[in-house]
Amino acid sequence: PADGVINGKIQPKRTKAMDMRFHWLRDRECQQQFRIYWRPGKLNYADYWTKHHAAKHHQNVRKEFLTPHIVLEMLRQEQQLN
């Protein structure tokens, strides 16, 4: 999987054939600018844009893109601490 290549857990057989984007991502991950991890399809928001899904899935996931739900939750938590 791509996360194993980026995180250095898997060494691809043909590194010369690897796309430069993977090397760029690996470099950023080593510099701790990015954190790369695997998510199953239902929790992987990148899948929303790259895969065909049923209408029900779009209805369930759409709110995450229209309203940055996780950002709002973090702001609420910060307000409760202050």
Image (tube, grey):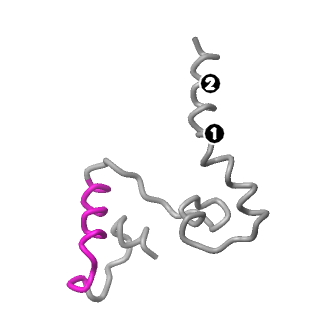
Q: Nearer the viewer, residue 43 or 29?
A: 43
Which amino acid type corresponds to the residue marked 1 in the rendered image?
His
- Asked if the magenta segment contains residue 22, the reply would be yes
Give the answer, above or below, for where 35 lies relative to 49.
above
Residue that mark 2 sits on: 77
Q: Which residue lies at the image location 31% right of the left edge and 48% below the top edge?
A: 32
Instruction: Please identify the residue farthest to the right as the structure is shown.
Output: 56
Residue 7: which quarter of the image? bottom left
Residue 26 position within the rendered picture, expressed as x and y whole percent measured from the top left: 29, 63
Horizontal side of 62 relative to 27 (left or right) equals right
Q: Quadrant of the C terminus?
A: top right
Q: Secondary structure at mark 2?
A: helix
Residue 69 - label: 1
Label 2 Cα neighbours within 10 Å, binned few <14 / some 14-19 / many ≥20: few
**Which of label 2 and label 1 is nearer to you?**
1
Residue 9: which quarter of the image? bottom left
Q: Taken as a whole, is the magenta stretch helix, strand or loop?
A: helix
Residue 61: which quarter of the image? bottom right
Q: Which residue lies at the image location 58% right of the left edge and 30% below the top edge?
A: 74
Label 1 Cα neighbours within 10 Å, binned few <14 / some 14-19 / many ≥20: few
Residue 53 - label: none
Give the answer, above or below, for where 81 lies relative to 35.
above
Q: Which residue lies at the image location 57% right of the left edge and 66% below the top edge?
A: 47
Residue bounds of the magenta highlight = 15-30
How many numbered marks does the figure carry? 2
Q: Nearer the viewer, residue 29 or 43?
A: 43
Label 2 vs 1, first from the N-terminus: 1
Question: Spatial distance from mark 2 to mark 1, Cα to Cα?
Answer: 12 Å
Horizontal side of 41 relative to 16 (left or right) equals right
